[in-house]
C-alpha cells in the first residue's frame, strides 16, 4: 500500500517512513533502512525517521551509525526524550558511563514520570555506585 502511495507521490516522506516501519516489522532490514533514508532525504527534519533509523542500526549492531542518527534526532528536537534515552543506553553499553549518566540526567529533565524514567534513574544510580567504587 505504501509502495503504491510512493508511486503516486514519490515525494511523500510519511509514506516512505510508514513503508520502512512495515518492512522493518517484516524483517526486511535493508529495504527498511533504504526507506528511512528516503524519508530523511525527502524531509531532513523528520525526527522520527532519524530515530527509527537509529533503532534499526542499533539492532543491527551498527553502533556508530545509530549514535550519529540519535544525535541528529536530538539536534532537530531537543524536547524529544526518546533519542536521549537511547543514546544514553548506547553510551552505557559502550562503557562511556559519564556520558550515559549525563544523558540520563537530561532524559529525566524531559520525562520524570514514565517507566523509562525509572530505568534512567537506576542507570544513574548504577553509574554513581560504579564511580564511587572505582574512585575509592
Image (spheres, grey):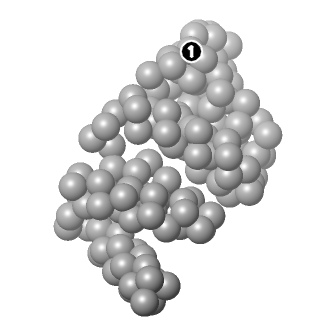
Is residue 19 positioned above or below 110 on the image?
Answer: above
Is residue 53 positioned above or below 27 on the image?
Answer: above
Instruction: Give residue 4's position: percent from left, percent from top.
Output: 66, 21
Q: Residues within 10 Å of mark 1 (few under 14, many from 20)?
A: some
Question: Which residue is painted at 68% across and 52% down in the image?
Answer: 63
Asked whether 96 or 77 is in front, the reply is 96
Question: Which residue is painted at 34% across and 33% down in the image?
Answer: 77
Asked whether 97 or 61 is in front, the reply is 97
Instruction: Give residue 12's position: percent from left, percent from top.
Output: 54, 16
Instruction: Give residue 10's position: percent from left, percent from top.
Output: 63, 11
Is residue 79 positioned above or below 6 on the image?
Answer: below
Quarter that holds the N terminus: top right
Residue placed under numbered mark 1 in the picture: 42
Question: Which residue is painted at 49% across and 39% down in the image?
Answer: 71
Q: How many marks?
A: 1
- Residue 37 at least partly seen: yes
Asked whether 112 or 25 is in front, the reply is 112
Residue 53: image quadrant is top right
Residue 37: image quadrant is top right
Quarter that holds the C terminus: bottom left
Dot 1: element: helix
- Residue 26 at least partly seen: no
Instruction: Give residue 72's position: percent from left, percent from top.
Output: 49, 33
Question: Which residue is painted at 33% across and 43% down in the image?
Answer: 80
Is residue 8 positioned above or below 52 on the image?
Answer: above
- 53 displayed left or right of 70: right
Asked whether 75 or 9 is in front, the reply is 75
Amino acid at each position: 500500500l505504501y509502495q503504491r502511495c510512493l508511486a503516486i507521490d514519490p515525494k511523500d516522506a510519511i509514506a516512505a517512513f510508514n513503508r520502512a516501519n512495515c518492512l522493518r516489522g517484516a524483517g526486511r532490514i535493508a529495504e527498511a533502512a533504504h526507506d528511512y533514508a528516503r524519508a530523511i532525504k525527502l524531509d531532513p527534519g523528520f525526527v522520527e525517521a532519524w530515530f527509527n533509523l537509529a533503532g534499526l542500526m542499533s539492532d543491527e549492531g551498527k553502533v556508530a551509525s545509530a549514535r550519529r542518527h540519535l544525535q541528529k534526532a536530538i539536534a532537530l528536537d531537543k524536547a524529544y526524550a526518546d533519542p536521549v534515552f537511547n543514546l544514553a543506553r548506547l553510551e552505557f553499553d559502550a562503557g562511556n558511563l559519564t556520558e550515559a549518566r549525563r544523558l540520563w540526567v537530561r532524559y529525566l529533565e524531559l520525562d520524570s514520570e514514565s517507566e523509562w524514567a525509572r530505568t534512567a534513574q537506576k542507570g544513574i544510580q548504577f553509574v554513581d555506585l560504579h564511580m564511587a567504587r572505582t574512585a575509592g
